[in-house]
Image (cartoon, rainbow, N blue to C red):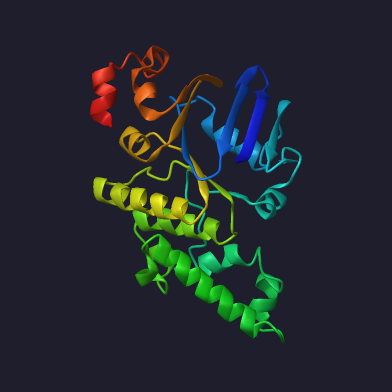
Amino acid sequence: MTLLHVEGLTKRFGGLTAVDGVTFTVYEGVIQAVIGPNGAGKTTLFNLLTGFDRADEGSADFEGASILEMRPHRVVKQGLARTFQNTQLFDNMTALDNVLVGRYSRTKTGMVAAALRLPGVGKEERLATEYAHRLLRLVDIDDIADASAADLPHGTRRLLEIARALATEPRLLLLDEPAAGLNTAETGVLAEALYRIRDTGVSLVVVEHDMGLVMEVSDEIIVLNQGRKIAEGPPLLIQKDPRVIEAYLGETESEMMDDA
């Protein structure tokens, strides 16, 4: 089943075309990666799909509904959530409360009513808390639920941001460089978390520079270079594609496979 179909998506900033006629489809139940050199247009692509930038041309339909004119909060309610290159946590809150902030996008009472303890919010607050704990367990960090977000190590902060995005109940989750700054052990934990998330029925699109992680977890890979899609396919084919090797500054096939 098609979740997201993008056709001819284009974004210009003055004389620079950051995303240039990009077309692709994301299907239900997959982990799909978007890779490319710095400046290839990967984050801009995510910004277009989640309402942070407006496209100049093209279309993007999520479960049959056009999302390009939606504001970010409407995109989330539609069922498409994202994380960012730099973690965007509330450092003055606990890990659990950070996840609850995401959860309030789906509750009837909302964050303000919960904070003020208005009548009728008790049961919903308990259910939201239980749900938040389940998500923390899903990404294997429930042991730090009561810790301040400001005190968490970088790898844990990455996982916490993913849990918060999951609290909005997305059908599709866009992850922008989730392995950035992680060591080998932390990247392994992240990979296992991505598999568990996919197994819950959430499809994933991952922008990532860590080729080892990309080749391990991806069902399909889209390669961008200078805003254009230059290749698309399963990991083994992408590793051998001469256009991809050239885009990565002449890196040889064997070097790409060593990275993987």
Q: Nearer the viewer, residue 192 or 250?
A: 192
Q: In the picture provided, is 12 more to the left or to the right than 131? A: right
Inspect this view and state whether residue 189 appears.
Answer: yes
User: Where on the picture, by quarter, is residue 209?
Assistant: top left
* Residue 173 pos. (x, y %): 54, 48
Q: Residue at x 59, y 66 (%)?
A: 103
Q: Residue at x 63, y 78 (%)?
A: 124
Q: Residue at x 25, y 22 (%)?
A: 255
Q: Residue at x 46, y 69 (%)?
A: 134
Residue farthest along the bottom direction in this orientation: 119
Residue farthest along the front direction in this orientation: 1
* Residue 16 pos. (x, y %): 62, 19
* Residue 193 pos. (x, y %): 38, 54
Classify 252 as above or below 26.
Answer: above
Inspect this view and state whether residue 94 appears.
Answer: no
Q: How many marks?
A: 0
